[in-house]
Amino acid sequence: MSGFLEELLGEKLVTGGGEEVDVHSLGARGISLLGLYFGCSLSAPCAQLSASLAAFYGRLRGDAAAGPGAGAGAGAAAEPEPRRRLEIVFVSSDQDQRQWQDFVRDMPWLALPYKEKHRKLKLWNKYRISNIPSLIFLDATTGKVVCRNGLLVIRDDPEGLEFPWGPKPFREVIAGPLLRNNGQSLESSSLEGSHVGVYFSAHWCPPCRSLTRVLVESYRKIKEAGQKFEIIFVSADRSEESFKQYFSEMPWLAVPYTDEARRSRLNRLYGIQGIPTLIVLDPQGEVITRQGRVEVLNDEDCREFPWHPKPVLELSDSNAVQLNEGPCLVLFVDSEDDGESEAAKQLIQPIAEKIIAKYKAKEEEAPLLFFVAGEDDMTDSLRDYTNLPEAAPLLTILDMSARAKYVMDVEEITPAIVEAFVNDFLAEKLKPEPI
């Protein structure tokens, strides 16, 4: 276990009081669950979370009365109780060391040292953290993500009775009555044999309302084509009245607004960090894509339903948001001709498939997304924003969160060049340029 933890966190962590703790000691203490808390001292929501998380952490470990850092570096004198086999590590985005020190001083858990900025950034990218505060739980032995939305765990299970909060099958989480907007109630068993879209949305959210209008048409086309498909609306509305008003526009099913526990469990299951989000499931309840929003907007005729992920995407207005999710390889080509873009995709695809398969075998997200960019306004804006040369073909890796770019400007792009470029990036052999 300590090997995985050291690879993830480095050799040393620190307590709120500034004492160093060897990461391998976590293994000796029998830690089975690791929480990564992503936050910043300047964020009021992070300050609020820290207070509630401290109480939660103390209850779970049985040391609520202890001072900051209590037990964090202790040895393995006794086998810990199952509910105490939890450790939390704070991963900060602070840019000022004094502010960071003031913020971590009262934390009873551990933190990555302030100087470990590169490692912090790698963790933000690895787990695709898009907002703060965020709290995810990992199996400390395997590194697998157990729960992507720990904030809801604290709210829904304040005593830790469901520890370690592992994922449950969709069929189990969705079990119960579902509604149609005419008041008809159906049992969730009616979903059997269907592809399912789990739609997290709210009336107060303008992008949600825009997507809903498109999704209504997509739903109609898929049903008319004879496909077994159902959508389940999981509301984030602020009142039942708003829910009813919004749901009246939808021809599909919904989790009852009054069933807050089930709505929360679905948010936890899929680690929802923002809306609108459309998760598309196969008939067995396994995730096909978390990018249903992008797929619906890109495929108005629904010809590619159920939208199995493509190894390489063609950059567009609707999928450009994914550039912010982590490092992205973008191959710029010099033609609006579809043939040129298709040839570029075919060049990259074997490398992308290889990387995706490697990380899927480890049940991890691939560390790169892959795009081809032609000549259009979106590409021009991206080049301007990242200060890229006008050359084409141009092979790049863009890391928006790190504000870093890696550029290979050669006359001819070959599969061998792409693969070497990717491997050098993953091995951290490339020198970044600032964006």
Image: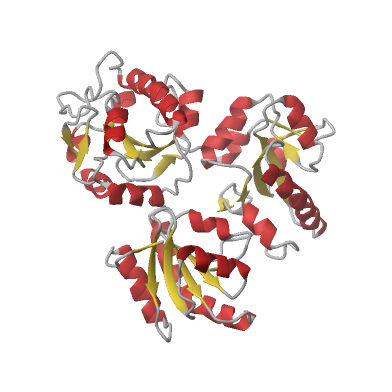
Q: Is residue 356 above or below residue 207?
A: below
Left or right, residue 130 beside residue 100: right
x, y (%) of residue 205? Answer: 67, 39
Q: Residue furthest top?
A: 65
Task: Answer with the quarter of the image where residue 339 lies.
Answer: bottom right
Q: Is residue 4 above or below residue 248?
A: below
Query: Image quadrant for the C terminus?
Result: bottom left
Which is nearer the eye, 107 or 352?
A: 107
Which is nearer the eye, 406 or 73?
A: 406
Q: Is residue 194 above or below residue 411?
A: above
Query: Image quadrant for the N terminus?
Result: top left
Left or right, residue 260 beside residue 76: right
Can residue 86 be seen here? no
Can residue 219 be seen here? yes
Task: Answer with the quarter of the image where residue 378 lies.
Answer: bottom right
Left or right, residue 110 beside residue 93: left
Q: Residue at x 27, y 34 (%)?
A: 98
